Structure formats: structure tokens, C-alpha cells
Image (tube, rainbow, N blue to C red):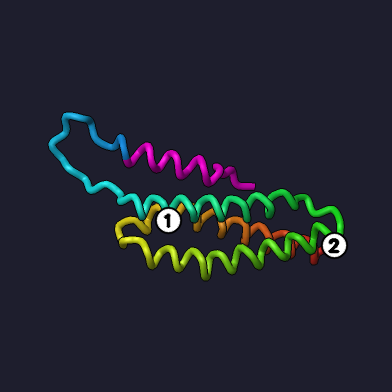
Amino acid sequence: MHETIKPETAFNAMLEITENSLPLNSSLKIPKMGSSSLEEIRICYLNASQILCHFWMCFPVTNAAVEEKVNRMVESIIKYKNTTMQESMKKLPSKDIRFLKHLSDQLDLALVTHDQWLAKKGKR
């Protein structure tokens, strides 16, 4: 299994890097992320972390009720990625969309894990 970090941790690290990316005496100026972009990204991370938390809590799948929950969570992940996250990306300036890459990777990892679990389940 891949080792991953929590979305909240990644978001906080991203903020720290953004805020502290240059020494104070640097003459280079990089544009800071606007507060509306920051808030949009924060909301994306918080919402997705809730969905992902419920998804990962289902493993290992031990009974039919948990299996049903896994399937509901996969539907939620797909819906979130294809609707909510896409809407958020439309609101962000193109330079800030890259900050959602980690989150997208986390959602993809959950979907890949589900596919692998289904394949393994089918071999029994």
C-alpha cells in the first residue's frame, strides 16, 4: 500500500511553503495566493478529507454492510472529483489549480485501491 499524508497536513505544508518560499531579504517577488483561492482550496481539502476518511475506515472490508459503505464512498469520491472539485477549479486562477494536484492524487489512490480490492475479491 502507498504511504500517504493527510490532506490537512499537505494543505498546511503548502501554506507554509507559499508563505516562506523566499528569504526576507530577497529581491524576487512572487505573487501570493489570494485569500479567496486559499479559502476555496481549504474547503476542497476539508471536504475531500472527510470522504477519504470514511473510505479508508472501511478497510479491511469485513462484512456486507461495510462493502456497501465502500461502494457508497466510491460513488461519493467520483461525484466529488467530477463535480465539486471541477467547480472549484473553475473558480481558481490557473496558477493556483496546481495546489489541488495532491488532493486529486489522493482521490485517485482511493479509486485505484477500490479497483484492486474488487479484482482481489473476484479471484476468491
Q: Residue at x 37, y 37 (%)?
A: 16
Relative to 73, residue 46 above or below: above
Task: Name the spot of residue 96 as percent of width and height, x first.
Answer: 34, 56
Secondary structure under tag 1 reads helix
CA separation in Å, label 1 and label 2:
43 Å
Q: Which mark is residue 26?
A: none
Q: Principal SS element in the magenta part?
A: helix
Q: Residue at x 31, y 61 (%)?
A: 93
Q: Residue at x 59, y 43 (%)?
A: 3
Task: Name the spot of residue 104 as percent of width and height, x first.
Answer: 50, 58
Q: Nearer the viewer, residue 60 or 77?
A: 77
Task: Name the spot of residue 20 as percent of width and height, x first.
Answer: 30, 35
Q: Residues within 10 Å of mark 1 (few under 14, many from 20)?
A: some
* Residue type beneath disc 1: Glu
Task: Give yes or no for residue 36 being in the magenta stretch.
Answer: no
Q: Residue at x 72, y 49 (%)?
A: 57
For the record, the magenta segment spans: 1-18
Name the side, left or right, on which 117 lies relative to 50: right
Q: Which mark is residue 40?
A: 1
Secondary structure under tag 2 reads loop
CB-based contact (under 8 Å), mark 1 and mark 2: no
**Residue occupied by mark 2:** 124
The image quarter containing residue 119 is bottom right
Q: Quadrant of the C terminus?
A: bottom right
Task: Name the spot of residue 12 as percent of width and height, x first.
Answer: 45, 40
* Residue type beneath disc 2: Arg
Relative to 54, residue 91 above or below: below
Q: Nearer the viewer, residue 62 or 47?
A: 47
Name the side, left or right, on which 2 lies relative to 62: left
Q: Earlier in the sequence, mark 1 or mark 2?
A: 1
